[in-house]
């Protein structure tokens, strides 16, 4: 019996994990990407595997906070005002989703997805013998003000109710867990279930594993056209001028997924959320755990090649231009929490920017679209790409095999806005 052919469009961490589990199911898998593979959002992010991130981006209070932040050129969150129908429509849906009721429905689902993915990620690393600097010491959210600590404590209490190991820390306890740092904080929350890895190292080694298993990966391959037939099936895709035919197609192209779907008259509310990162190869003071600087919304991750800082969410289409004011804002916030560091320590950094695919309700799109029988979509993971990558890949493989997915995907339906 001939193996079913599956083409995965997108070689980021979501596409690669989909290819991994599809291969396990016996499919013949080809991954296509329009870059050389080194520039996607999976490479430069914070590398968090964070079950603690149970609150979606669209949540109560974010609208007013976002309006206040938009008055600052160096703020952690920014939506660039412009007369763009896609952005306006996305913004209206985002506002509608930012309610207590919607968040209450999303929290248990995100907890199930994140905890499952956390377990699966560790299993995958062990099974495939991938050393990517996996660190299971958790994430500490550092807070400088009582208001911030109260906000984070509310989230912490929700994670505890869901069965996660979480501790509220005094300033002294926070310092004891990271003794190299001279911390200027009031306290923090330690999410002990969280972990991290070095994402670009993981991807490089994961690609080798996939190739050894027979997965074909093609870079610098531009998908210029997607064709369909009268049976509501994808008929083929045109890649670098040549027709490519498969039995199933998985679209996991991150922030570019929306534009590809427009060829099929599918309107997927999706915006790119630009984030920045940079690495200090030889940090003067390192961390034992990952950290989030609460008020600044900056992530700090000890990695195999140094200490990475990552931050900002800039909703601005597909623009990857580096904004120096936002990078400077990240640096200023670091020196406020970590007084050992000065602006001078960051003079030789090489900033990186990537686009996180953001849905209006902060939940990913995982599943089939009603319009096409052989098209699966996996995108919209926003800041949870690494955290949710492995469970997403497993769910995509289950759906491609016409199995009932192990987690109810109703809230993640691709057509939920149609």
Image (cartoon, helix red, strand yellow):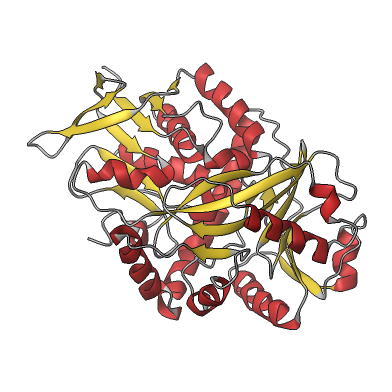
Residue nearest the viewer, comparing 72 with 136: 72
- Any part of residue 403 in sight: no
- Any part of residue 224 in sight: yes
Q: Is residue 224 left or right of residue 405?
A: left
Q: Is residue 340 left or right of residue 121?
A: right
Give me the residue at 35% from left, 61% from top: 87
Percent across and percent down for residue 2 are: 27, 17
For the N terminus, the image quarter is top left
**Residue 362 vertical placement versus 26 (above, below):** below
Percent across and percent down for residue 178 are: 87, 57
Q: Is residue 55 left or right of residue 32?
A: right
**Residue 84 vertical placement versus 239 (above, below):** below
Q: Quadrant of residue 121?
A: top right
Q: Is residue 289 left or right of residue 271?
A: right
Percent across and percent down for residue 198 are: 68, 39
Percent across and percent down for residue 224 are: 28, 30
How many numbered marks have been drawn onto this rendered protein structure? 0
**Residue 72 vertical placement versus 15 (above, below):** below
Give me the residue at 47% from left, 31% from top: 20
């Amino acid at each position: 019996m001939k193996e079913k052919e599956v083409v995965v469009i997108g070689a980021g961490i979501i596409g690669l994990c989909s290819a991994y589990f599809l291969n396990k199911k016996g499919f013949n898998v080809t991954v296509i990407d329009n870059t050389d593979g080194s520039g996607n959002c999976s490479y430069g992010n914070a590398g968090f595997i964070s079950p603690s991130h149970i609150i979606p981006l669209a949540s109560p209070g974010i609208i007013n906070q976002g309006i206040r932040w938009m008055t600052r050129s160096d703020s952690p969150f920014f939506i660039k005002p412009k007369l763009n129908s896609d952005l306006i429509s996305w913004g209206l849906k985002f506002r509608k989703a930012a309610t207590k009721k919607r968040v209450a429905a999303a929290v248990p689902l995100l907890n199930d997805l994140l905890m499952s993915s956390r377990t699966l990620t560790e299993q995958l690393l062990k099974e495939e013998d991938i050393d990517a600097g996996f660190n299971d010491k958790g994430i500490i959210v550092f807070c400088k003000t009582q208001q911030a600590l109260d906000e984070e404590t509310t989230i912490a209490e929700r994670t505890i109710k869901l069965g996660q190991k979480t501790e509220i820390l005094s300033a002294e306890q926070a310092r004891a867990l990271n003794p190299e740092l001279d911390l200027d904080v009031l306290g923090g929350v330690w999410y002990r279930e969280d972990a991290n890895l070095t994402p670009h190292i993981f991807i490089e080694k994961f690609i080798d594993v996939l190739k050894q298993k027979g997965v074909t990966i093609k870079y610098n391959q531009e998908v210029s056209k997607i064709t369909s037939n009268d049976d509501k099936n994808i008929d083929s895709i045109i890649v670098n001028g040549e027709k490519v035919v498969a039995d199933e197609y998985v679209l996991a192209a991150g922030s570019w997924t929306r534009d590809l779907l427009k060829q099929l008259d599918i309107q997927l509310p999706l915006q790119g959320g630009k984030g920045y990162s940079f690495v200090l190869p030889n940090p003067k003071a390192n961390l034992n755990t990952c950290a989030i600087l609460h008020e600044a919304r900056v992530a700090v991750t000890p990695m195999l090649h140094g200490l990475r800082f990552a931050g900002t969410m800039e909703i601005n289409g597909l623009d990857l231009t580096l904004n120096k004011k936002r990078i400077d804002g990240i640096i200023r916030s670091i020196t406020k929490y970590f007084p050992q560091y000065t602006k001078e320590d960051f003079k030789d950094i090489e900033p990186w920017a990537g686009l996180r695919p953001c849905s209006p309700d902060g939940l990913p799109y995982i599943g089939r679209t009603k319009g096409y029988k052989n098209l699966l979509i996996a995108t919209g993971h926003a800041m949870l790409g690494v955290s949710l990558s492995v469970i997403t890949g497993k769910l995509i493989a289950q759906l491609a095999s016409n199995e009932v997915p192990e987690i109810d995907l109703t809230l993640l339906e691709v057509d939920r806005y149609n």
